[in-house]
Structures are given as structure tokens and as C-alpha cells.
Image (cartoon, grey):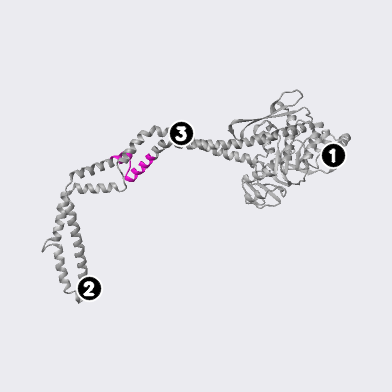
Amino acid sequence: MLTSLSIKNYALIEDINIGLQPGFTIITGETGAGKSIMLGALGLLLGDRADFSSIRDTEKKCVIEGTFGISNYKLENFFKKEDLDYEKQSIIRREILPSGKSRAFINDTPVKITALQKLGTYLIDIHSQHETLSLGNAEYQFNVIDTIAKNEAVILEYKKELKEYKVLLNRFEELKEQQSQAAKEYDYNIFLLNELEEANLKEGMLEELEELYEELNNVEELTENLSSAVNMLQQEEIGSLDSLKSVRASLSRIAQFSANYENFHERVQSVIIELDDLEAEMTDALDRIEANPEELEVVNQKLQVIYNLQKKHNAENIEELLSIMRELQEKVSVTENAESALNEVQAAIKDQEIQLKKTATKLHENREKIIPAFIEQTEQILKDLGMPNARLNIELEIGKEFLANGLDKLEWYLAANKGGSFKEIKKAASGGELSRIMLAVKSILAAQSNLPTIIFDEIDTGVSGEIAKKMGEILKKMGSNMQVIAITHLPQIAGKGATHFKIFKEDNETATQTKIVELEENDRIEELALMLGGNTKSDSARAHAKALLN
């Protein structure tokens, strides 16, 4: 529950700090006194978007801080998951700096706004005047039924399965589009692929063919020059080898005289060995050279095929052609295997549909099970609130289309008067009737949930007199199980509160400020008398106020 609230430099508030108690708390004040400002400040604590224009003094930072007693609400796992220090008295703080930047803290640890929003769902439900209108909204109606049916875990599972289902549907459409596109290009891709495959391309192939072509195309020049080189090595008397052998003989006779001469002899010997090997290899190469016009033509044709493919595909080398060939193989494969891929995804879609339907059916059954009791409870509370003939009908119909929260279509209908026909609740109920229905719904939800605090902003719109008194009794009863804070203009409700705060404006020399004070018994009597009598406080109004308090 909310145990204290501090607001500094926010809108018309300079600095207020109030302590709050369990049970039923009342907040009253004239229209425009600043009750909505307090709700705005609380909204910031729960993760609402910060507005720099809300800062009172733009030279100072705005600070809103709330202390929450959370020991009874099993929130340890949330704090652990968010990597936060768990404290039985946890402090949430929101700051808006003069720069316009907003900061948020939980137990002095900086957090993102999403963390405040998540934690806020466990701490406070703020019922605004606008929310009453949402009774006719299907999403709100589903939320109410699912909260009572305890469907939270099932809905999370359904949403996860629905997301996977939509991914599969998108994949199926993508495959169909790819298949359609590939089919249009299939014949041309097959033609290009066959051309590349028939070329039997291999890495390094072009260089090898070009080298072979040069050899076959220059047989005469190769033969002439290799023969000349071999002869120069082999000729007697003037051949290089014979000359070197003579040099070796001369050096062998002086090698013994010093290491230097011996080194000369060894080096010449190495040269002779190398030249012997070279001469043998050149002779072998010469023996293998022969004119082969047929092979030359074959090599030339292969080269022309590769050159043409390079030009056609704008490729610089064999490696690029091989890469293009692999891409074409993949495109052709998509077309040839498209039916199989589509069938595979269709099978997965069917399996997912079965699982989705199973989960959606569970949601439907859980909802269907609690609706009769919910209708009975709501009608009983409405009877207490001066709608004795009101009848509620909730139509829950399971369809075939997977929607955001299942297969169900849901609609609430109301017959407000005896003998009246059922109409959609948003069309059948007046403003005051909507307020009473919303209070009935909230009181049922409060009994189901473990929520620490609920705040009502003028839930009493459109009601008065005895009905307002009944509303106050229901709010007071809710306060026995949770902290209930009600902003009200009705003395019949204000008299039921265990604690009473008054918000008012006060002018000083420079500005108008919103302030809040807790009223003691005598002050409460005066406030209720003022609410009963308008701008005057008569003795009869005071007597009536005392009666309301007692």
C-alpha cells in the first residue's frame, strides 16, 4: 500500500508530504483545487510520460516520491528479475530536471520507465473518470472477465503461440512470392546454369588453359630456343658444362692450399651439378614438344567459352563465375523444391492452429465458467446501489478467427429497468448508471486480486442521495481488504472514510499554491457541512455532517 507521498515543484504544488493509512481514505476539495494534480503526480510514479511544462519553478527540479509497503504482496521475484534491491518499504522516485530530462529510481537504483510501469501494475489501480466509459469497450470487458477467470498465464501462452503462428503465415506468403518470382525466371536461370555447368569450371582453370595455349601456339620457337640452349650446355670444347669442368679441374689442384680455394672448388662443383640437372630437364622438355593443331583448337575453344561467360556475366575471374553458378543453383532449387517447402510450412501452420485452438478453447471455457457468478454478483451490488431491476447479460461466442485474446467475441448487455430489453451497455446506461456498474465491477475485481491500493477519481459521477451513501458503504467495505482512496464531491461518500484529506488553493504574495491537509473530526464536520450546504454552513448542515460521520 501507499504509505507516504511527497510532491515538490509540480504544477501548483511547491512542497507537500502526506502520510496515508490502510482502509478507506477520502480526498475532497473544490473544483480546480488540485485533485487532478495529485493524480498526475501519482501517474508519474507509475511510469506516465513526463511533461516539462508541469514543473512549477523551471530553475529547480521536480521530485515526486512514494513509499510503498509491499511485504504482503510477494514481489521478491519481480525485484530479483529487475536486478533491484527488495525492501519491505520500497521507495519510488521520479525526477524532472530543469533540462527537461526525466529520471526514475526504485530504492535509489536508476531504472527505465518500463520498470516503473511493470511495478505499478502490482501496486496501484487508478480509476479515472474517463475509465468509466471504457465499460463499453470490448478490450476492457475481456480484461475484467479474464482477471476474474485468472486467465493471465493462459493469455500469455496464447499470445506467444499467436506470434509464432503469424510468423509461419508470413513465411508461407514469402515462399509463395519467391516461388512465383522464381517460376517466371526459371527457364532463363536453367539456361544460364546449364551453360556454366557444361563449362566444367574449376578454380585456376583459366590460368592453366592460357599457359597450355601459349605452349601449343609457339612450338617452333620453343623447339628452336630450347635446342640452342641445350647445345650451348652440351657442345664439346665451348659448351658451358665442359668449360666448367675444366675450371673444376684447375681448382681441384689448388684447393688444398687454403679454405678459400677449397670453397671456390665446391661452389663450381655445385654449379656443375645444377647445370647437369637443368640440361637434363631441358632435354626432356625438348623431347616432349611436338606440334598438335587438334589440341590447340580444343584449348582455344575452351578459352573462348570462358571468355564469353566472363563477358556475359560481367565476371573478372573463374571464382566469380563459380559464385554466380551457385546462386543460380539456389534459385533453380527454390523453384524445384518450392512445393515441398510450402507443404512443410503448411504442415507447421496446421499444427500451430491446433495448439492455438486448444489454448483459445481453454480461455473460452475459463471465461464461460465464471460469467454466471459474475453476473449474479454484479446484479446484487447494483440492487444495493438503487438499480433493483437491472439485469446484466454477457454474450460469449467462440468464433473461427484467431483474435488478439482468443477466438471469443464478447459483448456486455444491460437492461436497466423492469421489462426493458437488453442493449449494449454503452448505449443502455446513463452516466450515473455507468458509475454504479463500474463500482460494482471494481469491487468484485478487488475481492479477486491482491492489489494493495485502488484510487477512485469521482466514481460517484451522476449519483447522489441514498445511492451515494450505498456507494460509500461499498467503498468502505472494499477498504477492509485493501487501501481505497476516493476523490469525491459527495458528503455521503466522504463521511464513510476512515481518513479525510482536503485539497485547497492558497494565494501568497507571488503565486497560487495547492496544499493538502488531513482533517481532524471537527474539521471534517465543517468540511462535510460545507459540502452539504454549498457556501454556507448552517447548524442543520453540521448536524447532518455529524450524522454522516457517525
> Cβ–Cβ below 8 Å for labels 3 and 1?
no
What amino acid is found at the position of numbered circle 2 in the picture? Asn
Q: In terms of secondary structure, what is the magenta stretch mainly?
A: helix
Q: Is residue 18 left or right of residue 332?
A: right
Q: Quadrant of residue 315?
A: top left
Amino acid type at mark 3: Lys
> Which circle's residue, 2 or 1, is located before the other in the chain?
2
Identify residue for label 3: 176
Residue 455 horizontal side relative to residue 531, left or right: left
Residue 344 visible, this angle: yes
On residue 116, the disc is none
The 10 Å Cα crowd at callout 2, few under 14, some 14 to 19, many 20 or more, is few
Q: Tell me residue 144's x, y (percent).
A: 68, 36
Query: Is 531 in the magenta?
Result: no
Assign a secondary structure to mark 1.
Answer: helix
Dot 1 surroundings within 10 Å: few (below 14), some, or many (20 or more)?
some
Label 3: state its secondary structure.
helix
Q: Name the quadrant containing residue 442.
A: top right
Q: Amino acid type of disc 1?
A: Leu
Extent of the magenta region: 308-329
Q: Nearer the viewer, residue 288 or 139?
A: 288
Question: What residue did someone put label 1 on?
Answer: 549
Does residue 327 lie above or below 249 as drawn?
above
- For label 2, the SS is helix
Depth-wise, is mark 2 or mark 3 nearer the camera? 3
Determine the CA span between mark 2 and mark 1.
128 Å
322 part of magenta stretch: yes
> Which residue is rendered at x = 34% and y = 38% of the image?
193
Name the residue tied to disc 2: 260
Residue 114 image position (x, y, % from top left): 62, 44
Q: Nearer the viewer, residue 244 or 18?
A: 244
